[in-house]
């Protein structure tokens, strides 16, 4: 490498949201105003906070968190970010409600439509799909759920609105892979956490690790990607992503595809 160049590594984590209400209480959707936009159950908040605390032990800092607009993802991100920014390190802390003080300069967070769940009838029960497949979000209201001072208001999202309804599985996978690449290139000097859905984690493994098939992504399961980034002045060139996640670790299980 040229002595004038500086080589670093960029890390990208892709995290599935915590435990969702509609799968724990099948009656919830019958009276909900937004039955397609499930919140977390109490255990989901606790699991997300524990995950954020676990991220504190990573060998690198998380600088930026980008979040799907679905409520369960925003709530997950809020718990994770609070844990990452917590100033007091009381081991008895169970959720963000118990955190006394945070340092909001540690992590910045914003909503990104492109990280949303797959939008087709195979993933969302037809009976709860909003009229014309139009999913409305009050982003300003969602942003109030993030810890005070952590919201980055300067961010321009990659997707300014939700992807079209009834996208194919191929399109969903392509979108998730695109988001990982585009967001990494948008913030090449930062380590990222993308708070998304099963599909986002699944794609983050099989798109960058040949001939693999993901069989399980637990709630708050996550993958870890890393790529080399070489800097010369303010210009960067990046290598390929490497999947660091071992199967069965961090809540993600995968195996080799059967070769025909």
Image (cartoon, grey):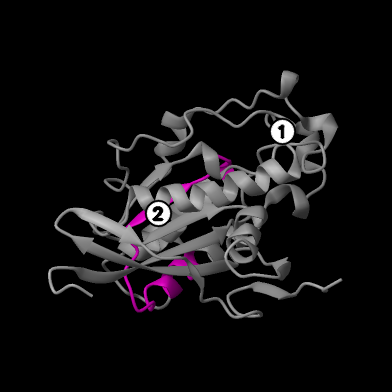
- What residue did someone put label 1 on? 32
Please say if 247 is above or below 137.
Answer: below
Nearest to N terminus: mark 1 or mark 2: 1
Near-viewer residue (27 or 143): 143
Of 89 and 16, nearer the camera is 16
Q: Residue 245, located in which quarter of the rendered image? A: bottom right
Query: Where is residue 148 drawn, in percent x and y?
Result: 30, 46
Residue 68 covered by magenta stretch:
yes
Compared with 89, 158 (above or below) is above
Total marks shown come to: 2
> Residue 112, percent across and down?
47, 40
Please check the rendered image and state whether residue 48 is part of the magenta-colored stretch, yes or no: no
Residue 184's mark?
Answer: 2
Q: Residues within 10 Å of mark 1 (few under 14, many from 20)?
A: few
Q: Residue 71, relative to residue 233: is it above or below?
A: above
Number of other residues with Cα within 10 Å of mark 2, as a class: few under 14, some 14 to 19, many 20 or more? some
Q: Secondary structure at mark 1?
A: loop
Cα separation between marks 1 and 2: 36 Å
Q: Nearer the viewer, mark 1 or mark 2?
A: 2
Labelled pair 1, 2 in contact (Cβ < 8 Å): no
Q: Which residue is at 62% across, 62% downward?
A: 43
Residue extent of the magenta highlight: 49-71
Residue at image point 75% right, 39% down: 168
Dot 2 falls on a residue whose secondary structure is helix
Is residue 188 toward the left or the right of residue 206 in the image?
Answer: left
Front-most of residues 32 and 240: 240
Q: In the figure, is residue 107 to the left or right of 251?
A: left
| Residue 194 appears in the rendering | yes
Percent position of residue 205, x then y: 61, 66
């Amino acid at each position: 490498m040229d002595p004038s160049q500086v080589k670093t590594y960029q890390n990208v984590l892709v995290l599935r949201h915590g435990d969702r209400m509609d799968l724990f209480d099948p009656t919830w959707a019958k009276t909900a105003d937004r039955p397609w936009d499930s919140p977390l159950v109490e255990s989901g908040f606790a699991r997300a906070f524990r995950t954020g605390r676990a991220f504190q032990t990573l060998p690198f800092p998380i600088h930026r968190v980008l979040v799907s607009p679905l409520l369960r993802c925003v709530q997950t991100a809020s718990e994770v970010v609070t844990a990452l920014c917590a100033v007091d390190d009381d081991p008895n802390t169970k959720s963000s409600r118990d955190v006394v003080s945070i340092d909001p300069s540690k992590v910045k967070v914003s909503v990104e439509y492109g990280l949303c769940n797959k939008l087709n009838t195979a993933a969302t029960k037809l009976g709860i799909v909003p009229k014309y497949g139009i999913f409305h979000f009050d982003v300003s209201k969602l942003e109030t759920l993030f810890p005070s001072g952590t919201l980055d208001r300067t961010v321009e999202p990659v997707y300014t609105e939700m992807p079209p309804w009834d996208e194919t599985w191929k399109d969903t996978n392509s979108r998730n892979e695109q988001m990982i690449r585009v967001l990494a290139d948008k913030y090449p000097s930062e380590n990222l956490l993308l708070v998304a859905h099963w599909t986002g984690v699944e794609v983050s493994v099989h798109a960058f690790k040949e001939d693999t098939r993901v069989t399980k992504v637990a709630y708050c399961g996550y993958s870890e990607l890393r790529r080399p980034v070489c800097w010369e002045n303010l210009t960067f060139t990046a290598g390929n992503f490497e999947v660091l996640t071992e199967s069965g670790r961090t809540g993600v299980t995968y195996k080799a595809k059967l070769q025909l």
